[in-house]
Image (cartoon, rainbow, N blue to C red):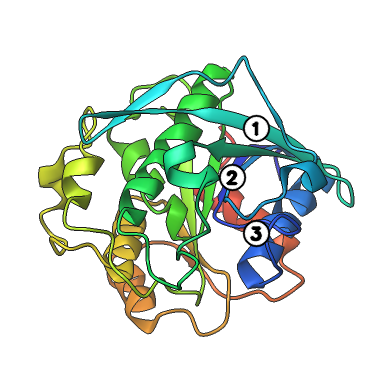
Amino acid sequence: MAKKKILFINQEISPYVPDNAMSVMGRELPRTMQDRNHEIRTFMPKWGNINERRGQLHEVIRLSGINLIIDDTDHPLVIKVASIPSCRVQVYFIDNDDYFSNRQMTVDENGLDYPDNGERAIFFARGVLETVKKQCWVPDIIHCQGWMSGVVPFYIKTAYKDEPSFANTKVVTSLFNKEFQGDFGTNFKQCVDFRDAKSELLAPYNDEFTFQDLGKLAIDYSDGVILADKDVSKTLQKYAKDKNIPTLGFQGEEFGDAYEAFYDQISPEL
């Protein structure tokens, strides 16, 4: 297939967080595509439980310093970077003291959901896209993995649709069986509002956004869906099917050829 520029936006990547189906795929998919000579870039949140010294993270000053306004509040964006020695994959980390550095992942030390998880996902999505713009890099494919990247397809097809970096980009969303059990706050729709990403576009979804709502939002604005895990939500599978979204079934460990072919189907060579 034609070599592509692929942007991976991941919720979790091993070894920075514990191994599970999502974090292992977060590492192996970029590695596999890089080994096949595709040009890749990879992002994840800088969760507070990531050991920066052990992972050898360091700040990228030239990419940091942007302020993102969410719900009328400024939030400084900090970009860090590290490389996974075992597979030579470089990872960019989206950081912010309020949302990530001083927090655990989706729940706090007492196992309670962070009430602003929706805002955190919005900050992460916009942080990645603003950083890619600043890098003047033009991906052919954006591949989103995990609910933290669930707002990205919506932003690509609305707020960022006229940006040179994303005007012709196709979006793929991977679905996993690792569901988020809480909701994303009563102000999620208000916080999403940015440029052409108008909150009224979210009228079809529940006012209190749930995991299922965010999954449906990602599917609605994606060009393709991948079942990246066993036992993915039957509701979301049916939703993608009813919407006639091209869908690739679960591939197991030998996924490289099928994923490449799916990328080519979604974003054929011009």
Q: Position of residue 119 (x, y in %)?
A: 32, 47
Of residues 143 and 36, the one drawn nearer to the viewer in this rendering = 143
Residue labelled with disc 3: 259
- Image quadrant in which the C terminus is located: top right
First in sequence: mark 2 or mark 1?
2
Whether residue 20 is visible to the viewer of this picture, yes or no, is yes
Q: Residue most toward the top? A: 62
Q: What x and y, as percent, mark residue 102? A: 51, 47
Residue 15 placement, left or right of 10: right
The amino acid on which the numbered mark 1 sits, given as a three-letter code, is: Lys
Q: Secondary structure at mark 2?
A: loop
Labelled disc at residue 46? 2
> Pointer 1: what residue?
80
How dense is the environment of label 3, judged by Cα within 10 Å: few (below 14), some, or many (20 and up)? Answer: some
Secondary structure found at label 3 = helix
Residue 31 picture location, percent across and down = 78, 50
